[in-house]
Image: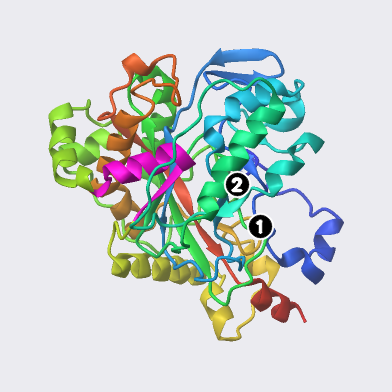
Amino acid sequence: MKSKKGSNTNKKPHPMAKSKLSGQKFVSRGTGLHIDSNLYSMWRTEISKGKFIDLDRMRPFQSFYALSDANPDQKLKDGGLEVVPGFHLYAEEYFGFLPDQTSRRVAHLPHSTKFKGREDTWILNCIRKVQRMPENWTPYTLDTAKSQDLHELIQKSRRLVTEHDKMDYIPIQRGDFILWDIRLPHQNSDANDSDTIRSVFYHAYLLAEPQEINIKTVKDILKSRKTRDHQPDFNKKWTDIEKQGLDPLPELDTPFTKMLYNVEEWDVNVGDEIISRFGNLLTDKHIAFYKQYGYVVIENMIDSNICDQLYNQILSHAKFCGCDVGSLMQGGLITAEHWDKIGGAFGAMVEFFWLPIQEQLRLDERAYAVTSKLLSETWARNDQSFSCPFADRIDPRKLWLYNDRVNIRVPDAVIRKMQQ
Ligand SMILES: [Fe+2]
């Protein structure tokens, strides 16, 4: 979920704001189904209707560390990630079959596509929870030939969802790393009916080669690190909240960490060495699963203790900022005004970027190795399912960081009770 750029914090509250302090409006309704790229123009950035510039952002994958366990009940909405499995294979073709609805679907964000049309109704029945790959999983023969018409495409897409339904459900656990395709429709479920807080840390990478695509973004990110500011991509309202109450971030002191922030030019030998140590976390079966469903879960990639530490750091810094989210689960009370000190939609995103353990996990070699290896098997290959006009210029070992936020999703029942 993206926030609008640069909202004015001094603006008077809208008259409706008060009514949001009561009733169901406190409860987060999730992000709504969307894709994190512009499917009408994947390889050029459309800054306004019909006006294009060279591509100015590419994260080859979206990804996060799970900081909490998903609920074991597949049918229960637990606030977690849901996707339309396999649709990445057909996404570009799908939007080509539809009438041009760029302004309605892409709205003001040049790197996002929404599902809004009546013709999208079918896809709402194809949304599934992400899950771990079962031991006995075997790939399905993919049909990637061009479809004659929309009807054929929908049938192909549904077939993959049916395959996905055949798997035993194995919920994600804290410590898992989840990657998904930039063409895959996804959302956070529209409710958290579980009795636990759902939490994740979004952590992804930018292509460092071709350099011109992401150079401005990585420079902004490095600049933000020095001052602990938030990046221009996100809401400016909370930009100062991490400047107090935290120890200074450690210096970047290894070639690898310096290269991730573009302080040093990439030395691919360093990348090769890291991939040789950790690349095996992503198996051939994981890669096949990713190609089929557009997402994959790397099980137990980091220790669950470090997830707990980051989760506790989120809660303790939230408390420091005047929003004691942690107390909610013990029957405590916070208000929308409290929540407003740390983040957007109540019960969802928290605007923390620079907590010490967030930064520690960003600099971890394992996520880098897995991402790099998956990139070498997908976009850098330029095969039928991952067709990229500059594939021959991608070096999968050269990656920069894309720094993102953490998420806390309080059970809806807790919020409703608080409102009574
Ligand atoms: Fe998204």
Label 2 amino acid?
Met
Q: Which residue is the site of mark 1?
A: 345
Q: Residue at x 33, y 14 (%)?
A: 392
- Front in this rendered view, residue 134 or 27: 134
Residue 385 lies left or right of residue 300; in this view the side is right
- Point out the frontmost of discs 2 and 1: 2
Q: Position of residue 384 (x, y in %)?
A: 44, 21
Q: What element carries label 2?
A: loop
Disc 2 beta carbon < 8 A from ligand 1? yes
Q: Name the residue under label 2.
A: 1
Magenta stretch, overall SS: helix
296 falls in the magenta region: yes
Q: Does residue 112 sit above or below 278 in this rendering?
A: above
Q: Is there CB contact under 8 Å for labels 2 and 1?
A: yes
Q: Residue 419 location, x and y as percent? A: 75, 77
| Cα–Cα gap, marks 2 and 1 | 10 Å
Q: Quadrant of residue 67?
A: bottom left
Foreground: 132 or 12? 132
Could you say which is closer to the camera, residue 135 or residue 307? 135
Residue at 76% of width from left, 30% of height from top? 104
Q: Is mark 1 on a helix, strand or loop?
A: loop
Q: Give how far across and how far down residue 71 sits, in percent.
A: 51, 70
Kind of residue sitting beneath label 1: Ala
- The numbered dot on residue 147 is none
Give the vertical position of 337 relative to 233 (above or below).
below
**Label 1 crowd (10 A; few <14 / some 14-19 / many >=20):** many
Magenta span: 281-298
- The quarter of the picture where the C terminus appears is bottom right
Question: How many numbered dots are placed on residues in this image?
Answer: 2
